[in-house]
Image: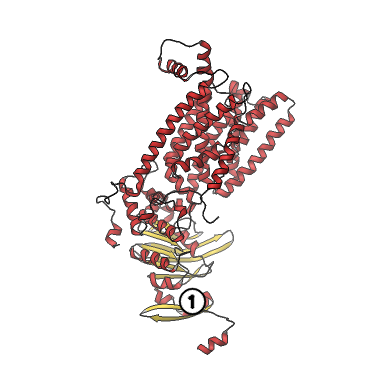
Amino acid sequence: MTLAAAQSAPAGPPPPGQDGDVLGLRRLRRRFVACLAGLGALLVLTLIAGVGAGAVAIGPGTVASVVGHHLVGFPGERTWSLSQDAIVWEVRLPRVLLGALVGAGLAVCGAAMQAMVRNMLADPYLLGVNSGASSGAAGAILFGFGAGFGEYALQGTAFLGALAASALVFLVARSSGRVTSVRLLLAGVAVGYALYALTSFLIFASDSAEGSRSVLFWLLGSLGLATWNGPLAVVAVVVLLTLGLLTLWGRRLDALAIGDDTALSLGVSPAAFRTRLLLLVSLCVGVLVAASGSIGFVGLVVPHFARRVIGAAHARALPVAALLGAVFLVWADIAARVVLQPQELPIGIVTALVGAPFLLILVRRLHTPGV
Amino acid sequence: MICADGVSFAYGRTEVLREAGLTARPGQVLGLIGPNGSGKTTLLRTLYASLKPSQGTVLLDGTDLRKVPTREAATKLAVVVQEHGGDMPLLVSEMVMLGRTPHLAAFQRATDRDAAIAADALARVGVSHLAGRPFVGLSGGEKQRVLLARALAQQAEHLLLDEPTNHLDIRYQHEILDLVRSLGITAVVVLHDLNLAARYCHELVLLKQGRVVAAGTPDEVLVPEVLEPVYEVEVRRVDVDGELHLLFRPQHSFCAPALQEIA
């Protein structure tokens, strides 16, 4: 251990016997690529199954043909019925795509929140975003708020509610100039309860039983609003943007998840980075909740699952979490549509039923020395 | 070179540092010593801008630390702090690779060269064999070494350490500090154990209630006349083979007669 060796960066050949893979980082990378490929294939199969399943079952071949026909004009000849065409292209495909996007977005935002507040029980709704969106949606459904948004009154009001809630949480948590994780947690819980009360009050104050029922349904999450329209495009853009940015910020997220002083000593200003993360995550979750209601457990459970599969480094865990979240939510939606046919279950009930036991298993296997 | 001058800091209305200062010279190990609550860790935290002093300045190689961008500061100044990242099951190799963060732009991928630097850092603290293990599963001594390796991977000329010997057994206490001294870089170390400070530091700064009460070589600072009023214990200094060692006794001991007997 000489001083000369200590001061110069090793430029020589890598140590023999490891085929140049110092630290096993290339092996990790290969595993990551294999994992992405496997999950990507699984997602494609899941999407096909999701479009095929339902009150009218449609075979995978027909699904592929309809999608091919609409997307690239192949096959050109229509060998399926018009109703099959409408079910696949107009009804189920947008719904399944929305499910995949929402699942991916929730999983990625959940992972980022867990890193940001250093608490594995954090989820994307920690910022009170879903309570804000719920209040907005309840206002729109029961009292006709947001009529100015036209046909998108529900989504528009829910999104405004989500933004207002996260702005409030952020202001409270920031009170003395810095946003710390503990203050953020407490502010999120407090604002969440307050807005939950507001939503309950709106339901209570309205005398429309039908309206209350649709609010409840919306609160538990639904992909039923999906069509080929603006909101679906917005969700797609925002989710892909969030996934991309957060993945590129992977190293910084790792540093922040270890501690504020560690982040600082590695050149990442914790306060500034946390603010940027909060803006991105609340924007993304606001869009998701506005499009599909508050679907629980995906953002809480899927990140843990992804870390078990590929490790904790965010640059790898986030893309894996996105794929897992997409697959999980599409299957949950299939179950929601099929289990009580022709009745449709709110998807939040399915994700909670599946997610809670998963979480219990993860908690039991958790690697926490000294506890 | 790190130079703090007239640094004051208060948590709310509790003054923790009062015009404290220090100068860490190039290639030297400076020890920050003092009783509990004397402001050692607070002073250290002002040296990497984790705390902003209410008065006074911290100069990093002659530049006011407030004017150095966070990322640039991290290429000049590495810190070993006691944060272990709770639930995050990062591998040791990933933990050490994080030391390359300040050298990479936000969206830049780490290269083979970065991996080689990190591997070299692991080898230098003697824990290459742990590379594939989860960090959270390591023993206290192993964790401390990995954190030191991460700091080395930053290739900074300055190193700050907050009680790096905490929770380590005697052998590892000596190994860690011996390693720090052998690096030949500018280091500031917060230490509790005065005998370790005597052996491994070139210079010492002694704090009491947020003020510097003595500064100089271990030979100058570690004398009973200086230490006794600060620590409120009886101190005896003996030289064994030319190395100074300190022995301590309670000042108002119940066994005062026995002490007199020995004297």
Q: Which residue is at the front of the view, A267 or B93?
A: B93
Which quarter of the picture shows residue B121?
bottom left
Extreme residue in the left direction: A12
Q: Position of residue B85 (x, y in %)?
A: 49, 51
Colouring rule applied to residues: secondary structure
Which quarter of the picture shows residue A133?
top right
On the picture, is A274 further left or further right than B126?
right
On the picture, is B171 further left or further right than A274?
left
Task: Check the image and report above or below for A3 versus A294.
Answer: below
> Label 1: few (<14), some or many (≥20) within 10 Å?
many
Q: Which residue is at the front of the view, B9 or A325?
A: A325
Task: Check the image and report above or below for A235 versus B258.
Answer: above
Residue drawn at (44%, 42%), measured in percent from left and top?
Answer: A310
Task: Check the image and report above or below for B73 versus B182.
Answer: above
Image quarter where the C terminus of chain A lies is: bottom right
On the picture, is A138 further left or further right than B57?
right
Residue drawn at (27%, 51%), measured in percent from left and top?
Answer: A15
Q: Position of residue A243 (x, y in %)?
A: 46, 35
Q: Chain of mark 1?
A: B
Please give the count of numbered marks on the rendered protein: 1
Q: Position of residue A91 (x, y in %)?
A: 54, 19
Image quarter where the N terminus of chain A lies is: bottom left
Residue B42: tell me if it is visible: yes
Q: Position of residue A30 (x, y in %)?
A: 36, 40
What amino acid is found at the position of numbered circle 1 in the picture? Leu
Q: Which residue is mark 1?
A: B227
SS at circle 1:
helix
Residue B64: tell me if it is visible: no
Task: Check the image and report above or below for A257 versus B234.
Answer: above
